Image (spheres, grey):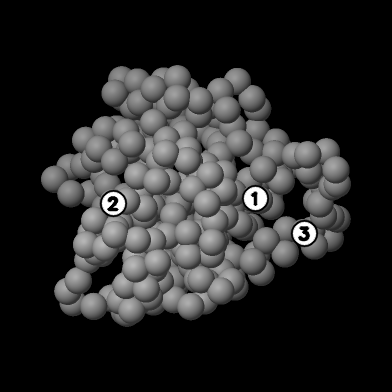
Amino acid sequence: MAAWRFDRWAGIAVSSLSDVQNYVRAVRDAPSLTDVGLVLKDATRRFRFDHFALAQKTHVVGGMRTVGAVRLTDFPEGWVEKLANSSFLADDPVLLASERSVAPFAWTNLGSIIKLTPRQRAYMAHARSAGLGEGFTVPIHVPGDASGLCSFVMQDGSPLPAESLPAAQYLACFAFEAARRLKRAAAQQEAADGPRLTQRQLDCLVLVARGKSNWVAGQLLGLSEQTVHKYVEAAKRRYGVSTRTELVVRALYDGQLSFGDVLN
C-alpha cells in the first residue's frame, strides 16, 4: 500500500501511513474524552485541516435534531455557543445528511444528498461567517446502537486537502469508537446523585489536574484563558468548593476523574 504523505503544519516534517496509525493507537489508548479531543486536534492540523468536530448521536425530538452525550470540537467559541441552542441546530444540514449517507461527503455536495431548504442554506452561510468553510464529514452508524459523525473543516475560502481525506476517514472511525467506549464506561461509573460536570468543564479540569495553567489549557483546547477560568469556576460552584485542589479531589472521589486522567 502506498504511504499517504502530508506536510506538517509547521513545515518541519512530513507524516506517512505509520504516523496515521500512531494517531489511531493514540485514540484507542486515550484515557479520557479530553485526550481523544487533543489527539483529534493534533491530527487535524497535521492533515492540513483547520477544525474538527466529533458528535454522538443525533436524535430527533419534537421535530428538532439535537446532539447527544459526546461532543468534541475545536470550532470557534462563538459558533459552539450557537450550537448549544437546539432550535438553531435543527437547521444543520450536515446532521441531516449524515443520517442519510453511509459514505463520507464534502459539504459542497450536500445538495446531492438532501434537498436544502432556505433555512439550511442560511445555516451554512452563518457557518461561513463564523470561519467554517468547506468541510468533510464521515457519517458513523453502529447498527442497533450509536450513530454520529466526525467532520474536518477548512476556514472559509480554503479547499479541502484531497490527499488527506483517506486518513481523516480512517481516524474518524477509530476516534468515534474510542469516544463511545469512554462515555459508556463513564456512565456506568456515575453515581445516582451528586454534582455532574459538563464535558467542557471536565476537559478543563483534566488539564488543571495535570498542573496546566489556564493559559496552557486554553491553548490545548482552543479556548481563551478567560473561558477556561469560567469553566473551572463553574465546576467549583457545582461542588461548593473554593480551591482547585478540592475540586480535583472531589471529582476523583466521585469518579468523574480517574487517576489515569490525572497521571497520563
Specify the amino acid type for callout 3: Asp
Specify the amino acid type for callout 2: Ala
Residue 19, which numbered label? 3
The residue shown at (33%, 36%) is 81
* Mark 3: secondary structure: helix
Q: Nearer the viewer, residue 161 or 74?
A: 74
Check contact, mark 3 vs mark 1: CB within 8 A.
no
The residue shown at (73%, 58%) is 20
Give the distance between the C-alpha atoms of the residues marked 1 and 2, in whole angstroms.
Answer: 27 Å
Question: Is the residue 246 above or below the residue 155 in the image?
Answer: below
Label 3 packing within 10 angstroms: few (<14), some (14-19), many (20+)? some
Residue 234, which numbered label? 2
Location of residue 87 by image quarter: top left
Check contact, mark 3 vs mark 2: CB within 8 A.
no
Which residue is under mark 1? Answer: 42
In the rendered image, the quadrant that contains the C terminus is bottom right
The residue shown at (80%, 62%) is 18
- The tag earlier along the polypeptide, 1 or 2, is 1
Question: Is the residue 175 above or below the residue 200 in the image?
Answer: below
Tell me residue 176's x, y (percent).
49, 61
Location of residue 174 by image quarter: bottom right
Give the distance between the C-alpha atoms of the residues marked 3 and 2, in whole angstroms.
Answer: 38 Å
Of badges 3 and 1, the one in the foreground is: 1
